[in-house]
Image (cartoon, grey):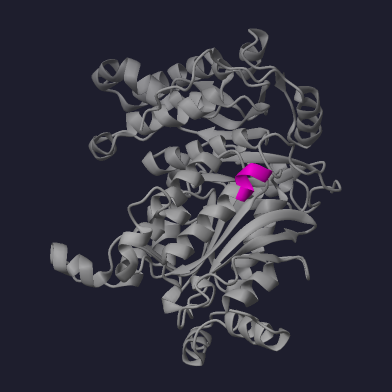
């Protein structure tokens, strides 16, 4: 087939136009952008170089075979990307769709550059299943490549519509997933399939909508109101990470923390009184630099990226505003994954501890709280980036271990004057040791006096100055000194030896 210039231009125009106009109109009615518009909004103007644009060009109604792939820059940094075109058979996968996705991930991995997934796909085309599903270059190779690339290059997903069946694993293998509320969904089986298999009547939104995954399942990380918001998440997320595991996170111009936040005033004198650790984090870091991740899920733990004097840090902080800051199954998983992410991409870790420990009781034991806690502690142990533990108010029980306490080779354990470190709090400890004696004291005043005396004795035993004198604590600092102390200590920890163990890999509790 010979093409003159006019015929080639017509072919290009047809391919770039995507599917039929009625599908464009249907998407626009839902507030959805055309896939090529998404790419244009995400990347630097004029930087996108497309691959495989003529995939399935001889077929009717399959421009680019429903997926756009190529390379571009975001804020001047090279990335690879793919974008499902939902105007072409609902963004479903054919054999060439799969091959294009495999090739662009392979390029990203080989070149050591981030991989961006703009997902809006109904899943595999059943009519093409023999060509796309089982073979050596079938859909499974996409996931194999994602797993190989994990921790080697950043992988970030923005989800604008469905991510169905096997295709749901593309977001699942990414570092983070931004989901557009009302349109984005992830599910292994459609609502019709679920009813057929299990008898349950549900909807896609109730089963796998954006809010479900961002607030309940934890598969989603950012709940976004608009597609522009989701694309901004992609840009912001990548701004904290290096291009690949061999590089350092990009520094930015240093900024002072907001002057309106008084760190000392934020922490109540009574450990029974909750305070919002997110405000503390924002008051400690460079102004407007904190990018919270999974803000709606397992809220008793706050995680995210920020900057200290322009340098990137990953923050893991207990938040007593939610469930008293106690660690549960989900919050342990949340911490585990984030710590691994930071360690993979050379992001120093900052632990801000105000933790009563792990939750106890029948329900959490049946959920495997020991196993999940062990998984978190494994991640803390294996992390070899600079890590500093700051005991803001308390670190009780295994919570101290989970927040990178002294036994886990932090580069420093710092305590504020409000800090307490113990197996458990004073009230619980006195009750545990003296429960029978307390019950035997009949006079109420005598009983109160006895408990108060034992509490005071316990508090003296765990006095923070005593712990510092015995080298458990490396420094006691005032809240207004903490930021400067951290900046200096992270600078001193740069270039540390990151060897951990003679082995291929551990056997992680899962």
Which one is nearer the viewer's eye here, 194 or 421?
194
Identity of the residue furthest to the right in this view: 253
Where does the image place residue 173, in percent across and percent down from the top left? Answer: 47, 48
Q: Look at the image and tell me whether residue 26 can be seen.
A: yes
Q: Residue at x 77, y 65 (%)?
A: 47
Q: Residue furthest front?
A: 2
**Main secondary structure of the magenta stretch:** helix
Highlighted magenta segment, given as a residue range: 107-112
Name the spot of residue 498 as percent of width and height, x first: 65, 20
Residue 295 visible within the image: no
Query: Seen from this angle, which residue lies furthest top?
Result: 470
Residue 280 versus residue 412 in the image, above or below: below
Please name whichever residue, 458 or 292, is drawn nearer the observer in this view of the structure.
292
On-image quarter of the C terminus: top left
Residue 227 percent across, percent down from the top left: 58, 73
61 left or right of 259? left
Q: Is residue 42 magenta?
A: no
Q: Quadrant of the N terminus?
A: bottom right
Residue located 25% across and 22% down the image: 439
Q: Nearer the viewer, residue 267 or 113?
A: 113
Total marks in image: 0
List the single residue furthest toward the left: 199
Give the residue at x 78% y 47%.
Answer: 286
Looking at the image, residue 226 lies above or below residue 242: below
Q: Is residue 111 magenta?
A: yes
In-image side of 450 versus 4 (left or right):
left
Report which quarter residue 50 is drawn in.
bottom right
What x and y, as percent, mark residue 223? 52, 64
């Amino acid at each position: 087939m010979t093409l003159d210039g006019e015929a080639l231009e017509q072919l290009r125009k047809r391919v770039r136009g995507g599917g039929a106009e009625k599908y464009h109109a249907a998407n626009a009615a839902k507030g959805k952008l055309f896939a090529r518009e998404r790419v244009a909004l995400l990347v630097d103007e004029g930087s996108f170089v497309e691959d495989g644009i003529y995939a399935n060009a001889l077929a009717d109604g399959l421009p680019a075979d429903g997926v756009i792939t190529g390379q571009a820059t975001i804020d001047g940094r090279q990335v690879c990307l793919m974008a499902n075109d939902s105007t072409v058979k609902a963004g479903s996968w054919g054999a060439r769709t799969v091959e294009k996705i495999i090739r662009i991930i392979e390029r990203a991995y080989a070149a050591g550059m981030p991989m961006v997934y703009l997902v809006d796909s109904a899943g595999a085309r059943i009519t093409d299943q023999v060509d796309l599903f089982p073979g050596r270059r079938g859909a499974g190779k996409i996931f194999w490549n994602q797993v190989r690339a994990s921790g080697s290059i950043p992988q970030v997903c923005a989800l604008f519509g469905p991510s169905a069946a096997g295709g749901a694993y593309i977001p699942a293998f990414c570092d983070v997933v931004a989901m557009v509320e009302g349109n984005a969904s992830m599910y292994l089986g459609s609502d019709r399939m679920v009813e057929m298999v299990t008898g349950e009547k549900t909807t896609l939104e109730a089963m796998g909508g954006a809010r479900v995954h961002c607030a309940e399942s934890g598969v989603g990380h950012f709940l976004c109101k608009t597609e522009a918001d989701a694309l901004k998440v992609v840009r912001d997320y990548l701004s904290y990470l290096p291009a690949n595991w061999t590089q350092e996170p990009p520094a930015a111009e240093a900024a002072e923390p907001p002057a309106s936040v008084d760190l000392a005033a934020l922490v109540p004198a009574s450990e029974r009184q909750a305070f919002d650790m997110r405000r503390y984090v924002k008051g400690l870091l460079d102004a407007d630099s904190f990018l919270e991740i999974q803000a709606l899920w397992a809220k008793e733990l706050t995680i995210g990226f920020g900057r200290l004097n322009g340098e990137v840090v990953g923050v893991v902080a207990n938040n007593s505003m939610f469930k008293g800051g106690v660690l549960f199954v989900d919050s342990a998983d949340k911490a585990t994954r984030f710590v691994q992410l930071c360690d993979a991409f050379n992001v120093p870790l900052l632990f801000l501890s105000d933790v009563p420990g792990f939750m106890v009781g029948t329900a959490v034991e049946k959920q495997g709280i020991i196993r999940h806690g062990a998984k978190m502690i494994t991640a803390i142990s294996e992390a070899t980036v600079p890590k500093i533990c700051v005991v803001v108010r308390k670190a009780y029980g295994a919570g101290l271990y989970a927040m990178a306490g002294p036994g886990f080779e932090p580069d420093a354990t710092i305590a504020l004057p409000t800090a307490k470190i113990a197996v458990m709090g004073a009230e619980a400890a006195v009750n545990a040791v003296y429960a029978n004696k307390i019950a035997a004291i009949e006079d109420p005043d005598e009983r109160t006096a006895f408990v108060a005396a034992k509490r005071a004795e316990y508090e003296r035993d765990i006095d923070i100055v005593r712990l510092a004198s015995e080298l458990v604590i490396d420094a006691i600092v005032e809240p207004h000194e903490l930021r400067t102390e951290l900046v200096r200590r992270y600078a001193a920890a740069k270039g540390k030896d990151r060897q951990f163990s003679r082995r291929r890999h551990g056997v992680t509790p899962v």
